[in-house]
Amino acid sequence: MRKRIWTIVIILGFTSLAGTHAFAKENDPATEFANAITRNDYKKAQSFIDQDYVRIPEIPEHVSAQSYKLAPSPINGEQILMVSFYDEKRKTERLAYIWELSVNYGRITQIHVLYEGFNPLADEARLIREYQTKFKRSLLTLTELPFRKVTEFHGFIEDDSSIELLYRSDEINGFLKVKAAPVTVDLDRFKFDNDDVYYTLKDGTKALYRVNNNLAYELRFHKNGMQYMLAIGNKKYLKVKYKPETLLKIANSMV
């Protein structure tokens, strides 16, 4: 627990340390390793680690390191490496990743990935935790998506206890939207068309599929006092056509 609290403190303090190499030491393998990483010289960086035990964690091609910070870990012989990159879409520098480096006998013998800021789903986890903490409500989360890769994630929490999560994918030129809120009306109130169809999830939960929604493929259901809406859209621009089974599979995956 102490180790995780320290990591949170490091993240919060990252911005205030901008422009400095905190606690960095000359000729220290962690410092040399970090210097190589920020030059995108991964071959050089690999030379500072014990290659029989560890490899550099995978870094996406679009993530180009800009600067780094090193700080001591509460664990003897370990250091926290924080690396930032320039986000072209946000036009600002942001935290890319945090690694915990184990250094023994002048070599890096282990790398633990503590945080990946370039992973869109890191923001998803933070927002869900924030919602559950603020409203003291459990929230079902996705384990299945209608595409292989999330390109962008956006989300927000409303004061009416609702949360909206939007997963965009260039693969389908569209998005999956999940909206959740405490149940206020019966599911039947969302049946706007005679063609709308009721389905049953694996655990017996009733779900409503809106057949004639022109904007998105939409499924709604209630569970544990919460109402959920799943939508894949915008239909006009999607590269893929979906059937109700896709949304049912997503709903059944939520835990």
Image (spheres, rainbow, N blue to C red):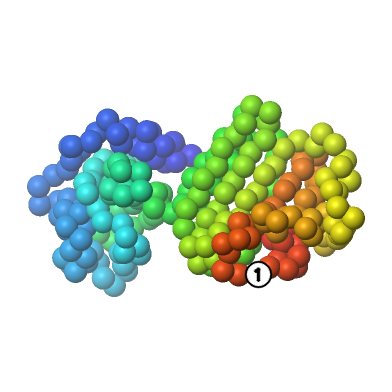
Image-quadrant location for residue 201: bottom right
Looking at the rendered structure, the kind of residue marked 1 is Lys
Can residue 241 be seen here? Answer: yes
Residue in the picture at 85% in, 49% down: 191
Relative height, residue 7 to residue 31 (above, below): above
> 191 left or right of 21?
right
> 164 left or right of 190?
left
Relative height, residue 50 to residue 113 (above, below): below
Residue, far bottom = 52
The residue at which mark 1 appears reads as: 241
Residue 245: x and y, percent? 75, 68
> 152 left or right of 87?
right
Image-quadrant location for residue 237: bottom right
> 136 left or right of 125?
right
Check disc 1: other Cα within 10 Å, few if <14, some if 14-19, many if 20+. Answer: few
Residue 119: x and y, percent? 43, 54
Of 198 and 196, nearer the camera is 196
Residue in the picture at 34% in, 37% down: 10
Of 13 and 103, nearer the camera is 13
Can residue 83 be seen here? Answer: no
Relative height, residue 76 to residue 12 (above, below): below
Residue 34: x and y, percent? 20, 53
How many marks the image carries: the answer is 1
Residue 204: x and y, percent? 88, 57
Residue, far top = 159
Residue in the picture at 76% in, 35% down: 182
Residue in the picture at 68% in, 68% down: 242
Q: Secondary structure beneath disc 1?
A: loop
